[in-house]
Amino acid sequence: MNENIISPFLKVVTVDDSPLVAERMGAILNDIKGIEFLENAKTIISARNLINTVKPDVVILDINLEEGEFRQTGIDLLVELRQNYPQMKIIIFTNHNELHYRLVCLAKGANYFFDKSSESHKISDVIKQWIIKK
């Protein structure tokens, strides 16, 4: 097999309102062969628009997002994505690493739940496994 040809690509979108985290995730994702990192969305509304337009294979989603007057969380978007895109892979990536949040997110359909402060390296491992399985 020719190692220069990596196909099919996984399309990945991140949803995080922190520019620093978005930049860090972009760097991690851009180092993975076999994915196409599309964009980061900062709000629920922009995430919804981006996801509905590009139909990514993977969404990396924070729980706490700034959303103005209508306060929604990443958990709300998780539920919506799971209903509308049942095959989509969803990784929760958050500083809210309490057991309650982990259990809620996994029960609502997240494939994985990772702590931003200590588990960012696990995201690339998981995505690499999904590339192999695709």
Image: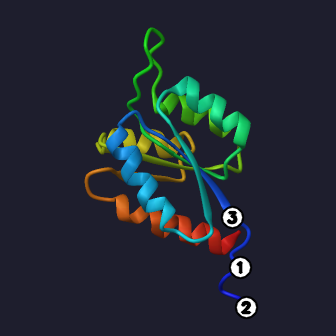
Query: Which amino acid lies under the numbered mark 3 shown in the image of this protein?
Result: Phe
Q: Position of residue 2 (x, y in %)?
A: 71, 89
Q: Nearer the viewer, residue 68 or 103?
A: 68
Q: Secondary structure at mark 2?
A: loop
Question: Pointer 3 and pointer 2: residues touching (CB < 8 Å)?
Answer: no
Q: Position of residue 104 (x, y in %)?
A: 45, 38
Q: Nearer the viewer, residue 120 or 19?
A: 19
Q: Residue at x 40, y 23 (%)?
A: 66
What is the number of the mark on residue 1?
2
Residue placed farthest to the left in the image? Answer: 117
What is the number of the mark on residue 9?
3
Q: How busy is the neighbourhood of tag 1: few (under 14 within 10 Å), some, or many (20 plus)?
A: few
Q: How far apart are the alpha carbons under marks 3 and 2?
A: 16 Å
Q: Position of residue 31 (x, y in %)?
A: 48, 67
Q: Taking 101 as reference, is 6 left or right? A: right
Residue under label 1, please give it: 5
